[in-house]
Image (spheres, grey):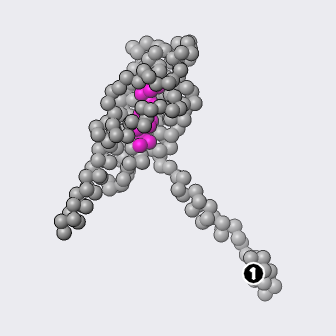
Amino acid sequence: MTSVIAASLATGCATVDMTDMATPMASKAEAPAEKNIVQRAAAKLYAAFTNRGFVAKSSGKRVQSAASVLLNGLEDRDLTDTEVVYANQDLPESVVEADIRFASKHVRQTTKAAEVFLEMADIDRNMREELESLEQALLAAREASDAFSKSTEREGSDFQVLETEIAALTRVTDRFGERVRLSAAKDMAARRAEERS
């Protein structure tokens, strides 16, 4: 490379700008790690909830969630066996209320991101990865709600707002599940048509 540049300089060529040559390689390397708005919002929610101790970092319930949503949304379940120790910290009511508001904000942001994405996405887009991200976020939200319910009154206004936000996230997650099921049905119909022809 240096011999080419030296030869160019010797023949009187103008300065060679090498900065643009590195850009395509860098963008190619970064492309696979790129996440869309739904995946980023869901990941942010999950990270915030685990970092704050609302949700256990390893939960067997989370592994079971994929089939549940694909069948017909997440059913209401008792999450009392969650390994969350949040309720055992005996936190002041004001701290718990602030944590609930913090959680509600993250759930709301994830729901809004999912709604925008669903509205803008092409009808034929495969949304399985987004659905999996939303499942994880929804399960984390439900686990957090369960942890909060052991630390405060379920009738409190902050807790009721969180429950409303979780219900909205459940609805949009179910809509993603419907799109995934519809896409799978179309693929199956196309394969059967090919087999018959």
Asked whether 113 falls inside the magenta stretch, the response is no
Front-most of 27 and 115?
A: 27
Left or right, 191 with respect to 12, comes to left
- In percent of width and height, residue 164 lies at 37, 26
The answer to if 138 sits in the magenta stretch is yes
Residue type pointed to by label 1:
Val
Residue on which disc 1 sits:
4
Left or right, 172 with reference to 137: left
Residue sitting at x 50%, y 49%: 35
Decide: is 197 above or below 14.
Answer: above
Picture coordinates of residue 19 (x, y %)?
69, 67
> Disc 1 on helix, strand or loop?
helix
Quadrant including the C terminus: bottom left
- Locate residue 100, reporting x and y percent: 49, 22
Residues in magenta?
132-145
Q: Residues within 10 Å of mark 1 (few under 14, many from 20)?
A: few
Measured along the vertical axis of the image, is residue 92 above or below residue 124?
Answer: above
